[in-house]
Amino acid sequence: MPNLSHASKVPIDRRDPIAAAQEVALVAAACAERRDRHGSVPDTEIAALAQTGLLHAPLPAAWGGIALGLGRANAALLRDVLRIIGGASLPLGRLYEGHVNAVRLVVGHGSERHLRRLGSESSAGRLSAVWNAETGAGLRLEGETLVGGKIHTSGLGIVLRPVLTARRGDEVMMIMPDIGSARGDLSGWTPLGMRASLTGCADFTGLAVTPADIIGAPGDYYRAPLFAGGAWRVLAVQLGGLEQLLALYRDQLLARGREGDPIQLARFGEAVARLETCRLWTARAADIAEDETQDPATVDALVNFARHEFERTALAIIERVERGIGLSAMLRPNPIERIVRDLTTYLRQPFPDAALAAGAGWALATRPPHADIGAL
């Protein structure tokens, strides 16, 4: 497993979170092509997240969260922060969204001790993450010892205290142990895109788990709406990538003098219209998911519909960009080539058919066929 960075405590810059995200985006954009080429650790970008206070931002007041206001009461603000970072670097956006996910789970189900741990990690300039994916027997908690591992562990080597799911008997637990001695492997991460997300697999066999490492009660990880409903944040990161893709598409059409071509105009117009569809679905999903008065089943259903429509629409945008620019959109160093690879990979979220089926089941069970499903 790569060496973990134990940075010195960093000061929290309590500025406007949009300005903070824009500063991080400038750093990330300058590094994006190099990170993609080498799959290297985004240490400069993570340092920027720490120095601007964005690592602390999702935490409660005692740990700096109110200063930047990224709690549940500010869905639009968090949406824009994720969108801005994703527009500069989808892999960095993926890592930051995983950190926000870990914080939300601990806020929802953990203790003050767990929050103190995440606050300490943020002060040290380290991200957290949520690692759930596994194969075979997966990760098990046998007594006070872990057996097994996880796959698709984004942030491997830079995350010291991720939120893990582990099976104990027939129950699924959330735990947050120190994984510094785990055995990690990044060699199998050879994807089309998202190369800089440091995604790999890790074996935690032999790691000790204390009662203080256990978060919440059995089954809390899958409890609505934090599980399915939280997927809106992934859409916000991806939306930033789509916005950057359309900006590059526009610039390259103008540079070629193709703005008067009626076919190009129609193709570009379709892409812009579909981008607005993605914006509307993301905003709708964020608003309802972050509204604590909403019924959890309703949140899950609408976010599942948003996932489905966002993916289909994003793929249609990519197809129009590639047709509009042609072969040069698929050649390095055109940044369109990198963003399309990253988006194509990142859009492949788990169990899309199951998500759509679950949303459809909710709609069938709760509303008559002629009802306006959007009027929740």
Image (spheres, rainbow, N blue to C red):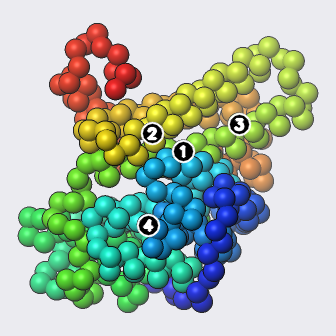
Residue 287, label in figure: 2
Amino acid type, label 3:
Leu
Q: Badges 1 and 2: C-beta atoms under 8 Å apart?
A: yes
The residue under the point 8% across, 64% down is 170
Does residue 299 appear in the picture of this structure?
yes
Residue type, numbered disc 1: Ala
**Comes first in the chain, label 3 or label 4:** 4
Which of the two discs, 4 and 2, labels the residue nearer the N terminus?
A: 4
Q: What residue is shown at x 21% (from left), y 29% (from top)? A: 361
Q: Which residue is mark 1?
A: 76
Closer mark to the observer between disc 1 and disc 4: 4
Q: Amino acid at mark 2?
A: Asp
Q: Position of residue 280 (x, y in %)?
A: 53, 31
The residue that mark 4 highlights is 60
Q: Position of residue 348 (x, y in %)?
A: 44, 46
The type of residue carrying mark 4 is Pro
Disc 2/disc 3 C-alpha distance (Å): 25 Å
Closer to the camera in the image, 241 or 2: 241
- Between circles 3 and 1, the one closer to the viewer is 1
Mark 3 residue element: helix
Which residue is under mark 3?
A: 246
Neighbor class of circle 4 (other Cα within 10 Å; few <14, some 14-19, many 20+) is some
Query: Closer to the N terminus: mark 1 or mark 2?
Result: 1
Q: Is residue 40 left or right of residue 66?
A: right
Which is nearer the N-term, disc 1 or disc 4?
4
Q: Is residue 92 above or below residue 248?
A: below
Q: Earlier in the sequence, mark 2 or mark 3?
A: 3
Compared with 7, 329 (above or below) is above
The CA distance from mark 1 to mark 4 is: 17 Å
Closer to the camera, 20 or 95? 20
